[in-house]
Amino acid sequence: EKLALDSYMQLIVAAPETPVSVQARLELAALRAARGDPANALDLLADALEKNPSVEVAERIRLRLAVVLLSKGDPKAALAQTAAVAKNPATTFPGEVRYLTAEACIQQKDWGKAIEQLLPFRDQGPFQNVPGLSDRALLRLGHALAQAGQWDQARVSFETLVQRFGQSPWVDEARYNLGFAWQKMNQLDQAVNNYAEVTRRTVSLLGAKAQLQLGLCRLEQKNFPEAAKSLLVVPYTYDYPELNATALSQAAQAYMGLTQPAEAAKLWQRVVKEHPNTEWAKAAEQGLAALQPPPPPAPAPAP
């Protein structure tokens, strides 16, 4: 990578005004941004725009600018770049314009405009199979719909991603969010099925979160044996402290539902010991206090 960076810089210095130097700036900016140097990337892209590139290359530069600006949390500036590209009705990048515009709207919590930009990736042929883009757009559409409280439409978006792009790197996240959408609609068995599929496919943080939600669904159904079993899989399988504390605390609630207070007490004690100074530890201490027998009544005063 260092050799690549040096080669790009040598090319730019040797022929700063040529089209190939513009392309070098564009590619070097992508590398800089990927390595956490957005300021350098923005400078390179601004320089590239000043070299009078062709329309297509200029649009590539502007879209890359939008990506970097979004990474910096500057959605207004990103929208200015996507809007400049959108003015060209013959742009080669209509999908990228829509997607990046939607991302800027999402950062601004403008869910309605984000949904408007992303719906064509679900419903319109030209946008439904853009390589490396349509699957991500469907995922973000589902997120925007969920934020807008449109859970059934969010479900449709996540299901569409899974059905159309079964090999996408976003499938597991889509399935998790599909489970969450079913859960929000109180279709708990459907939610469990999707969470279980995620746990079979990955042991990542996403898998741990799916296992936790699966147990919470069973707890909500008052299926206390399955809830306790599913929740305890989390601390015994994964190493994510916040999730483990949540799972142990909720498993204790399941044991209370099974009228097994001694088992619940063991889990609450574990939470207090392993996760001190957390909200879950405070809740566990309250649960343990509630299990203590009431103090004996005070003796009656002497006559």
Image (cartoon, helix red, strand yellow):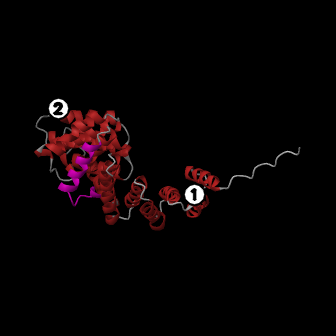
Residue at far right of view? 303
Which numbered disc, 1 or 2, marks the residue that appears first in the sequence? 2
Q: Against 229, is 117 above or below?
A: above
Residue in view at x 50 percent, y 57 percent: 257
In the picture, measured across the screen, residue 152 lies left or right of residue 235, that is left
The kind of residue on which mark 2 rests is: Lys
Residue in view at x 79 percent, y 48 percent: 298
Q: Is residue 94 magenta?
A: no
Tell me residue 45's x, y (percent): 28, 42
Q: Is residue 159 magenta?
A: yes
Tell me residue 153's x, y (percent): 24, 43
Tell me residue 39's x, y (percent): 38, 43
| Quarter of the rendering occupied by the C terminus | top right
* Observer able to see residue 147: yes
Q: Nearer the viewer, residue 4 or 102?
A: 102
Residue 34: mark in rendering: none
Q: How many marks?
A: 2
Which residues make up the magenta segment? Answer: 151-172
How packed mark 2 is, by other alpha carbons closer than 10 Å (few <14, some 14-19, many 20 or more), is few
Residue in view at x 23 percent, y 33 percent: 83
Q: Against 64, is 108 above or below?
A: above
In the picture, measured across the screen, residue 303 lies left or right of residue 203, that is right
* Observer able to see residue 54: no
Tell me where residue 120 sits by quadrant.
Answer: top left
Which residue is label 1 attached to? Answer: 275
Q: Nearer the viewer, residue 132 or 50?
A: 132
Marks 1/2 in contact by CB < 8 Å: the verdict is no
Residue at far bottom of view? 236
